[in-house]
Image (cartoon, helix red, strand yellow):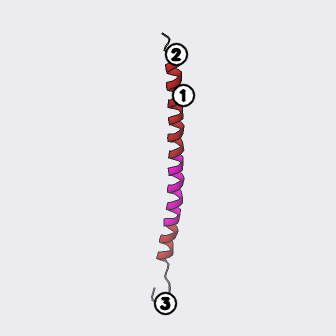
Amino acid sequence: MNPAPFFGIFSTIYAVIMIVVAGLAIYTLVLTIVFLRLRIAELKRGARPNGPLG
């Protein structure tokens, strides 16, 4: 009985899962940056005085 094929399959599945997890982490980071930029722009717009009464 040779355990090598099991480790080959296991390491392949592990590599696929790690690639998916890394992809999701990058996707989450990009979404966070985009929404933070939108939120900062919104806060800046709200802080500006709109007229003589401020």
Residue type at tag 3: Pro
Task: Look at the numbered disc 3 and give the secondary structure of its residue.
Answer: loop
Q: Nearer the viewer, residue 43 or 9?
A: 9
x and y percentages locating residue 2 in the rendered image = 50, 11
Instruction: Give how far apart the Cα atoms at labels 3 and 1 are.
Output: 66 Å
Tell me the number on the disc at residue 52. 3
x and y percentages locating residue 23 in the rendered image = 54, 44
Determine whether 6 is above or below 54 in the image: above
Q: Nearer the viewer, residue 22 or 11?
A: 11
Badge 1 is on which residue?
12
**Magenta stretch?**
25-39
Residue type at tag 2: Ala
**Is the stretch drawn in magenta largely helix, strand or loop?**
helix
Residue 27 belongs to magenta span:
yes
Task: Look at the numbered disc 2 and give the secondary structure of its residue.
Answer: helix
Tell me the number on the disc at residue 4. 2
